[in-house]
Image (tube, grey):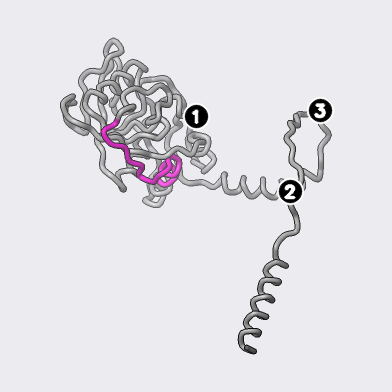
C-alpha cells in the first residue's frame, strides 16, 4: 500500500509539474485589417530595429556567390536563348542524376523571370530567375500527346528544351529529333517538366493525360543552385552556347 501511495504521489507531482509548464495565454480575440505603407508615413525606428538584423542576415545569404558566368544571359523572345538553354540544361543535368528521360521542357520563356548577368552568379540571381517552389516531375506521354506538346512549342515560337531539336516552319514542328532519334508518334516518351506546366500552367498543351506521372523529389530552383555550385566545384564557369536546338524558318 505504501508503494502504491508513493507511485500515486509521484504521478500527481509530475502532472502538476507538467501543468505548470503550460502557457496561461489563450486567444480571446482576433481581427483582420489592412495597413497601407508608403512614403507619407513617418519612419518607425522600433520597426526598423526589429527587422534590421533579419534583413542583414538575409542579404548576406542572398548575396553569396555560387559561381561565375562567362556571358550575360538576358531574357529574350528568340526561339532559342542563352537563358533558356542554361535553365533547361541545368535542370536536366541535375534530374538525370535521379532518373532517365527522353527530353526536358522545365519551363516556358514566360517562366524565366529574370536575367543572369555576366560575372558573379549569386543565390539572389537564382531566386530572381526562379522565385517559386515548383517541383520537377516526369511525365510518360503517348506519342500523340508529345505531338501536341511539340505543336505548342512551335506555335509559341520555341521554348527552353533539353534533349530535343526541331525546326519551326510556319508555326509547325519539323525535323524533330528526340534524344538523338527521329520522333516516332507511335511510341511513348518520358518528359521532364515542372509540376506547374504539368498542371496546365502557361497553357502548355499535351501534358493533361499522361500515362504516368512521377515526382522526383527535386525543386526546380534547387536543381539550378546545385548545378551552378557543382560547376564551380569542378573549376568551371557557366558558358552557355546556342547550339541550334530550336531553329525558326
Q: Quadrant of residue 73?
A: top left
Q: Distance between the residues labelled 3 and 2?
A: 34 Å
Whether residue 245 is situated above or below residue 86 in the rendered picture? above
Say which of 4 and 87 sits in front: 4
Q: Where is residue 138 in the image (x, y as percent from the top left)?
A: 31, 38
Magenta stretch: give its range: 210-226
As drawn, is 174 to the left or to the right of 206? left
Tag 3, which secondary structure? loop
Give the mark nearer the N terminus: 3 vs 1: 3
Residue pictured at 81% horizontal, 31% vertical: 41
Tag 1, which secondary structure? loop
Quarter of the image containing the N terminus? Answer: bottom right
Whether residue 177 is situated above or below residue 100 in the rendered picture? above
Q: Quadrant of residue 83?
A: top left
Q: How far apart are marks 1 and 2 (CA)?
A: 41 Å
Dot label at residue 113: 1
Dot label at residue 40: 3
**Count of all numbered marks drawn on residues in the image:** 3
Q: Closer to the camera: disc 1 or disc 2? A: 2
Amino acid at each position: 500500500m505504501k508503494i502504491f501511495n508513493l507511485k500515486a504521489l509521484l504521478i500527481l507531482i509530475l502532472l502538476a509539474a507538467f501543468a505548470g509548464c503550460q502557457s496561461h495565454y489563450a486567444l480571446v480575440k482576433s481581427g483582420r485589417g489592412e495597413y497601407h505603407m508608403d512614403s507619407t508615413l513617418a519612419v518607425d525606428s522600433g520597426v526598423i530595429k526589429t527587422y534590421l538584423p533579419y534583413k542583414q542576415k538575409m542579404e548576406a545569404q542572398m548575396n553569396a556567390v555560387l559561381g561565375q558566368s562567362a556571358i550575360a544571359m538576358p531574357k529574350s523572345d528568340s526561339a532559342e536563348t542563352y537563358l533558356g538553354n542554361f535553365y533547361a540544361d541545368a535542370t536536366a543535368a541535375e534530374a538525370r542524376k535521379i532518373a532517365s528521360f527522353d527530353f526536358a521542357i522545365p519551363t516556358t520563356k514566360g517562366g524565366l523571370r529574370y536575367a543572369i548577368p555576366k560575372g558573379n552568379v549569386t543565390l539572389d540571381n537564382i531566386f530572381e530567375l526562379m522565385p517559386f517552389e515548383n517541383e520537377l516531375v516526369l511525365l510518360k506521354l503517348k506519342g500523340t500527346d508529345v505531338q501536341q506538346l511539340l505543336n505548342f512549342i512551335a506555335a509559341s515560337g520555341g521554348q527552353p528544351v533539353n534533349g530535343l531539336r526541331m525546326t519551326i516552319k510556319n508555326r509547325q514542328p519539323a525535323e524533330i529529333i528526340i534524344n538523338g532519334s527521329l520522333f516516332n508518334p507511335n511510341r511513348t516518351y518520358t518528359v521532364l517538366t515542372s509540376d506547374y506546366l504539368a498542371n496546365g500552367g502557361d497553357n502548355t498543351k499535351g501534358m493533361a493525360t499522361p500515362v504516368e506521372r512521377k515526382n522526383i523529389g527535386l525543386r526546380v530552383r534547387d536543381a539550378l543552385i546545385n548545378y551552378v555550385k557543382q560547376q564551380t566545384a569542378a573549376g568551371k564557369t557557366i558558358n552557355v552556347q546556342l547550339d541550334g536546338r530550336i531553329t525558326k524558318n
